[in-house]
Image (tube, rainbow, N blue to C red):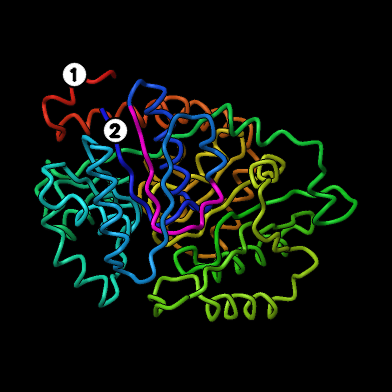
């Protein structure tokens, strides 16, 4: 089969990572895959070199750019995919319109849950949602949300959890650097980390409060925040869930009030995040909404115990009930981190087994292939698989 992915850009987000990995794995399975981006921000392009995945980089000037739509439709006509799979909001909308009248089935993606569309997004979605044939969510909660958002029947909504290339994560995590010393100086410390851009969905205020409780409960603990990367509002008005400068200012102002600057650090956006996480004792998550968290998978694969707030499918993922804190209380989260550290070896072993059983890229690709076969035209089934 021939699969075309459309996506806003190929930056370092979780959806972008999954598109790259899925496209590469589909080619390994004997299919053909192409990625069409709507923006020239493609720092992940190097990950596709030598993979056999075709990458087309475009640049839209407006939210809905007729010139880009025309070029995308022209590519669809020339490349003749058996299915088009959109990722992220713009990728979904462009996939729907580009396939109009072609007879090519279109799938959209749901990567989160319980968010609100802006007014512009709502009307764009309402006007074109009938052009999508189905939706693939990366969590059960996201699948339920997509059913409401699209008005789809249950059989049109599919759940395929994210997949991880475990050996690659382990390779990226291998490092001779001493990150504890780099961030906190000489000494023997226990380190908890959180990975994620500073945006409301991550609830950084709760993360900072949790860090403050932890380092005050035990002076040997340090906390590291990785991923201080903000997306500018650009030409468009930022939505309520955007990672805008005003939210960052609020977070950093809250951090300054805690007086914990020597024991809690912001590492910024790092290419070596897996290596840093691998040297931490616990990874914690304070998200209030999200899809399937790649960083949680990576920590689990690397043997780092995870503690999380209760959101999305996290209770289906983490093997122990006490790893998930329902209260959204910084005190309860801090105590859960201490408990996870106390039984870290046993938790790490359980997590590794879960990832290998449920969340490899091979497993995710096979599940996605099964979804695609429900939609593609009969002649495509004769293509190599």
Which quadrant holds the N terminus? top left
Which quadrant holds the C terminus? top left
What residue span does the magenta drawing correspond to? 32-44
Residue occupying the point 75% across, 48% down: 190
Residue occupying the point 29% across, 36% down: 3
- Percent from the top left, x then y, of residue 188? 85, 47
- Percent from the top left, x then y, of residue 253? 64, 81
Between 258 and 174, the one nearer to me in the picture = 174
Between discs 1 and 2, the one toward the N terminus: 2
Between 253 and 365, the one nearer to me in the picture = 365
Asked whether residue 39 is drawn in magenta, I would say yes
- Percent from the top left, x then y, of residue 366? 32, 26
User: What residue is disc 2 on?
Assistant: 368
- Percent from the top left, x then y, of residue 331? 57, 63
Circle 1: element type: helix
Residue occupying the point 26% across, 75% down: 120
Query: Which label sits on residue 382?
Result: 1
3D distance between C-alphas at marks 1 and 2: 17 Å
In the displayed structure image, the side of residue 142 where residue 56 appears, left or right: right
């Amino acid at each position: 089969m021939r699969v075309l992915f459309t996506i806003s850009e190929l930056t370092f987000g979780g959806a972008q990572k999954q598109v790259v990995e899925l496209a590469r794995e589909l080619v390994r399975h004997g299919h053909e895959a192409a990625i069409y981006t709507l923006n020239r921000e493609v720092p992940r392009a190097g990950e596709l070199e030598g993979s056999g995945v075709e990458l087309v980089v475009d640049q839209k000037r407006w939210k809905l750019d007729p010139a880009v739509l025309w070029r995308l439709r022209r590519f669809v006509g020339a490349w003749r995919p058996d299915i088009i799979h959109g990722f992220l909001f713009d990728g979904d909308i462009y996939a729907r319109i580009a396939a109009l009248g072609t007879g090519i089935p279109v799938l959209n993606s749901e990567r989160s849950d319980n968010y609100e569309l802006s007014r512009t997004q709502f009307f764009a979605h309402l006007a074109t949602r009938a052009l999508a044939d189905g939706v693939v969510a990366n969590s059960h909660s996201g699948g339920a949300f997509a059913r409401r958002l699209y008005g789809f029947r249950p059989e049109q909504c599919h759940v395929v959890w994210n997949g991880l290339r475990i050996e690659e994560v382990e390779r990226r995590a291998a490092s001779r650097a001493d990150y504890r010393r780099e961030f906190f100086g000489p000494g023997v410390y226990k380190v908890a980390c959180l990975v994620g851009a500073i945006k409301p969905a991550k609830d950084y205020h709760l993360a900072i409060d949790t860090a403050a409780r932890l380092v005050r409960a035990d002076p040997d603990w340090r906390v590291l925040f990785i991923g201080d990367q903000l997306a500018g509002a650009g030409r468009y008005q930022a939505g309520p869930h955007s990672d805008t400068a005003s939210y960052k200012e609020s977070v950093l102002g809250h951090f300054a009030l805690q007086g914990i600057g020597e024991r809690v650090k912001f590492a910024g956006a790092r290419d070596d995040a897996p290596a840093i996480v691998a040297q931490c004792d616990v990874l914690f998550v304070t998200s209030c909404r999200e899809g399937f968290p790649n960083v949680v998978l990576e920590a689990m694969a690397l043997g780092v115990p995870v503690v999380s707030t209760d959101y999305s499918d996290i209770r289906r993922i983490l093997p122990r009930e006490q790893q998930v804190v329902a209260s959204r209380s910084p005190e309860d989260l801090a105590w859960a981190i201490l408990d996870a550290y106390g039984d870290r070896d046993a938790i790490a072993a359980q997590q590794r087994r879960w990832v290998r059983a449920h969340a490899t890229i091979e497993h995710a690709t096979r599940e996605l292939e099964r979804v695609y076969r429900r939609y593609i035209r009969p002649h495509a089934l004769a293509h190599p698989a």
